[in-house]
Image (cartoon, rainbow, N blue to C red):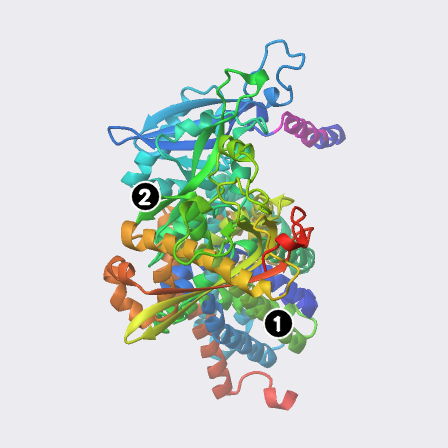
Amino acid sequence: MRSARSWLRVLPCCALLLLLGGCYDRIELNELAIADIMAIDRTEDGLLKVSLQFLIPSELTNPGGVGSGGGLRDPFYIMEATGATLPEAFSLLQAKVPRRLFTSHIRVIVLGEELARSGIGPVFDSLTRMRELRISADVVVTEGEGARLLRAAPRLGRLPVLALANTLGQRIVPQREIRQVAIALAAEGMDPFIPAVGLVPRIETQLEVGTRAQEYELTGVGIFRGDRLVGFAPLDLARGLAWLVDEAPFAAATIEWPPETGAPSPQLERTDLSPSEALIEREAPPGTGPGSPGSGLKEPNHITPLIVRARVHFHTEIQDGQVVVNVHAHAVDDIVTNQAGLDLTDPKVIPELEEALADSVKQRMQAMLRLAQEELNADVFGFGALIRRNYPQLWRTLRQDWHDHFRRLPVHITVDVDVRRTGLTGNPTIFRPEQLRK
Amino acid sequence: MRPAETKISPFQLAMLLIPGIGSTAILGLPGTTATFARQDAWMAPLVAFPASALVIWLCGRLAARFPDETFVEYAPKVLGRIPGKLCGLLLFWYFFHLDAAISREFADFLVAAAHPRTPMVLAVGLAGFAAAVAVRHGPEILARLGELFTPGAVVLLLVIVGMAYSSTDANLLKPVLENGLRPVLASGLITQAFTGQVILLAVLLPSVTRRDQGVKASYAALGVIVAALTLVSIVSLSVFGPITDKFLWPFFKVARIAKFGQVLARIDPLVIGFWVGGSCFKLAVHLYAAVVTFAQVFGLRDWRPLVFPMSALVSAYAAGHLQNFVEHGHMLAYFWPPYTQFFQLVLPAVVLIVAAIRGVGVRVDAKR
């Protein structure tokens, strides 16, 4: 009797041993295929082609070339499958991948142009419904095929996804997560926009001749009406969009001095200057005119501010029975370049300068506004939602044909710029006092 | 063993009520209320507050008339033997049905969010077993468990809210009252089905050391629950705006996107952990209420032998009485709110009114 009791006590201990084997249906890390970027394209027969890029962790810890013998191998590989829906494509993809697909670590989702033009709504149902995907993943569109972006090999960082996510994080163009796009799709009076990314060839160095590697480049934003892509806004307009949705870029935007009246010439944009062009400009013969340093440059009279802080406020009012949107932007700038030779030690100069800077921001916003209102007719700024917030009653009469109203919606933009600092120098180092402009 | 023989402090009662009511409501409720009230759903808990406070007041008044007795014990004294027992049985049914609903909601979330291939019966059964083990040792153990669990859960909630702050957009809460008050009242009724669960006091109050303090602590607990639900709704709505109502568990989605810079992110497993803990706790509290009411209706001296069989019945009912989650959601939104009000408000109100008219029980005024 007694021994039977003690045996009974031993039994649970033995049962506990079973737990040492671990969970009965566990999936170890080395049984997972961890995806980090996904590209979704529409095939010609209207199906979804899903391309996933998988990490290969062992290649990551083994820096290519250094003693590895085998030369450079990518720490990732790409597989794709075609199906009617996203989960269906996933399950077909699973047939080609020897480990279980794991999509929880997807950080960027690339939408191909064809898919974007035919409507992204259906895809977004899967993106928000599936358990593993995170709705904080970034979404980008690209001109042409989306899967192309998975094949880039950025030099900084061995993983394309990190390079891409970091590029998006530079706040040149507003970032958009799945969540934000889904909100814009579901909200009244708001159309989505998604940052557009393309590829640029890297400038070859002597060591790398013939590699033809490609880097990521922000090319602007894709503008949607409803769930369909209707056009791309190039980078300079995309920065205007950033202002209009109160996510102003940490970017420099150059103005000419003295300011010209009227629209700035397109060359004012220096961001589109390719490195080779910059080289030509730098090697141009020095200025010949007396007392004009650098007058050989195409545009010598530039002042470039760097935006430190920016805040945009939106107000609506009713004038003559019509809604008017007032956009007021306020920015704090630092001057980082004064090759125009403006006398920055003179306090009287600053208000003039501020006005000119404000004007350039305003031009930029108005150009974006024109594109959205007149050409694409897509309310990516959410002005409809703004009117709905402020005049719910009025909105009921507008929402049926909001896009018609949006086209004619008067938007007044005012910009205030404060110049706080002038970088590390007061007056330009290259000028003698008598050369300064007053 | 009578409930009056166990003693829990007023503070413990509050710690028992907060997770005993709030834990399932936090995740699921904002999505359901948002389907009716959209961006105004955060007002629903505030609308429900007075009604739930009324439930506490009713229970407090009844407990003052009948110190050391539960609802099942004093109902026959007030209404007569047969109607009184019948009311006790109805209250038992309410606790039983609610316990099954809690179990079901727990299992559905766990399976949908974390363990898609786990059979639901296993989730329901294990939770039921854990709850039963806790309940067997009486409400004091539950109360101490509550003291341990509640502060951590509140801190986690605040941490998630803080981490989600950068993703919020207050504009998504506007326009306020776009469709008038009616949708808000409708979603308030849904919320009342949850916050009205303070009817637990009809069973718990006799176990509290100082009754008047216990009632005060219950109001405070209700305040915490309402504040937490309002906060969770505001955050969910300002993060997800018009898609809040599409999500079955919006606050879980909030936890999934919550991050603190590059340092801390993806804390949703913690949320699942606290959900498991909180749901099991709520399951246990209501299991206790169901077992005690059942034992007292049938005049059993000790309720403890009933715990495991009752837990098994609850689990079986939970797993079997609904086909899928869609039915569950539909039931919670349309059938459940009016149904529960019968037990939470009508039942105690009828007993209190009859007791006052017939003058049964301790004179409340004399006691003051």
B269 to A87, vertically: above or below: below
Q: Which mark is residue A231?
A: 2
Where is residue A205? Give x, y as percent. Answer: 57, 21
Q: CA distance from mark 1 to mark 2?
A: 56 Å
Where is residue A18? Give x, y as percent. Answer: 64, 26
Q: Is residue A99 left or right of residue B143?
A: left
Residue A73 visible: yes
Q: Quadrant of the N terminus of chain A?
A: top right
Q: Which mark is residue B220?
A: 1
Where is residue B132? Give x, y as percent. Answer: 59, 50
B204 to B167, vertically: above or below: below
Q: Quadrant of the C terminus of chain A?
A: bottom right
Chain hosting mark 1: B
Give the amino acid at mark 1: Ala
Residue B360, magenta (yes or no) = no
Instruction: Examine the image and state in which quarter residue A81 appears.
Output: top left
Which range of residues does the magenta coloring cover?
A10-22
